[in-house]
Image (cartoon, helix red, strand yellow):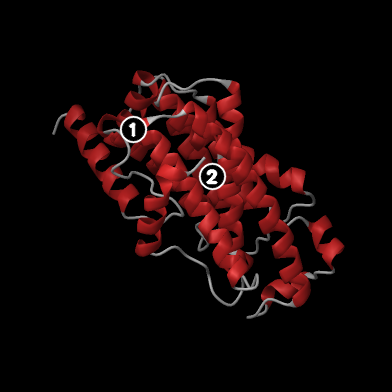
């Protein structure tokens, strides 16, 4: 098999990977331009692969950091034109042909490295800085793939991506705690009278519900502010981003309807939810 055949096989496997992994939004849906689907898929492969390395709970933190260092070295090398696999050539091709900002990939790796070592966040500003590197780069890369490169659009995209990341934290409150992580700012625990032990129960206590409610409302405002991005979009991309926003907001509603109990059950969108939200997408403003 030639290296170009390896590249096309990697793109194909990345597409399958993206389509079979659950998110609160469609990663590579039918709304994405056909010629861009493989590019989005290989970016998703890069991000999820690094995230999985950081999240490998069966090995030591030191080893996970070493593996992330090795993954970053491969990024360094592929950017120089040195490839060890079809996946690396595919990523290189996407970055070069679409003229993507390389720093955004390094920002993602920085966030995943932080995930290994940092388990608590003292303030919301600390958490926002994490989201700036863990979530916002993906939105900016999507815009760059569509040749949308202006700061106002980027800021609105950042609001959406940060809101999606925070929403995922609320969904995974119990799962993250079992991994030793809490993504609610410590200074806000104190404000609402929450103790670390409150995250270990099977049902969310009154004080923790109040903390979750506060965060849900704040995140809802980020989604609202992010809608400004829609004025820069047209066609199927506008549908895709609108669908994504509605998906994130739907998860927040599910948490609200559960009376902010994020420990008993993990709120999750079903296939029928995505269909209903898609029908509402043309009317989003």
Q: Is residue 124 left or right of residue 25?
A: right
Position in image of residue 75 (x %, y %): 44, 30
Depth order, front residue of 147/53: 147
- Disc 2 and disc 1: Cα gap in Å? 27 Å
Position in image of residue 188 (x %, y %): 81, 58
Q: Is residue 145 above or below residue 282?
A: above
Crowd around label 1: few <14 · some 14–19 · many ≥20 (10 Å): many
Mark before the other along the chain sequence, 2 or 1: 1
Which of the 4 image quarters holds residue 277?
bottom left
Position in image of residue 41 (x %, y %): 34, 40
Q: Which numbered tag is attached to residue 39?
A: 1
Position in image of residue 234 (x %, y %): 40, 29
Residue 158 visible in the displayed image? yes
Cβ–Cβ under 8 Å for marks 2 and 1: no
Q: Is residue 196 left or right of residue 67?
A: right
Residue 47 visible in the displayed image? no
The kind of secondary structure element at disc 1 is helix
Tell me what residue is drawn at x 52 percent, y 67 percent: 267
Q: Is residue 202 above or below residue 49?
A: below
Direction front: furthest residue: 283
Q: Which numbered tag is attached to residue 66?
A: 2
Q: Nearer the viewer, mark 2 or mark 1?
A: 1
């Amino acid at each position: 098999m030639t290296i170009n055949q390896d590249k096309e096989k990697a793109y194909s496997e990345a597409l399958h990977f993206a389509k079979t992994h659950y998110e609160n939004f469609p990663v590579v849906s039918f709304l994405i331009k056909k010629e861009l689907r493989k590019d989005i898929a290989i970016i998703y492969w890069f991000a999820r692969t690094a995230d999985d390395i950081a999240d490998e709970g069966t090995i030591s933190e030191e080893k996970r950091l070493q593996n992330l260092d090795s993954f970053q070295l491969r990024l360094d090398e592929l950017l120089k034109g040195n490839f060890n696999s079809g996946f690396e050539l595919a990523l290189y091709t996407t970055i070069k042909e679409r003229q993507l900002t390389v720093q955004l990939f390094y920002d993602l790796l920085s966030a995943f490295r932080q995930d290994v070592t940092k388990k608590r966040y003292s303030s919301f500003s600390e958490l926002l800085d994490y989201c700036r590197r863990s979530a916002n780069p993906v939105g900016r890369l999507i815009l760059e793939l569509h040749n949308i490169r202006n700061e106002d659009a980027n800021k609105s995209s950042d609001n959406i991506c940060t809101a999606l990341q925070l929403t995922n934290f609320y969904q995974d409150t119990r799962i993250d705690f079992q991994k030793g992580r809490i993504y609610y700012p410590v200074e806000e625990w104190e404000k609402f009278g929450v103790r670390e032990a409150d995250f270990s129960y099977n049902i969310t206590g009154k004080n923790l519900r109040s903390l979750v409610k506060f965060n849900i409302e704040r995140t809802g405002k980020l989604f609202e502010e992010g809608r400004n991005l829609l004025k820069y979009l047209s066609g199927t991309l506008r549908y895709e981003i609108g669908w994504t926003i509605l998906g994130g907001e739907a998860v927040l509603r599910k948490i609200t309807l559960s009376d902010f109990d994020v420990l008993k059950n993990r709120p999750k969108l079903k296939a029928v939810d995505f269909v209903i939200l898609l029908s509402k997408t043309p009317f989003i403003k």
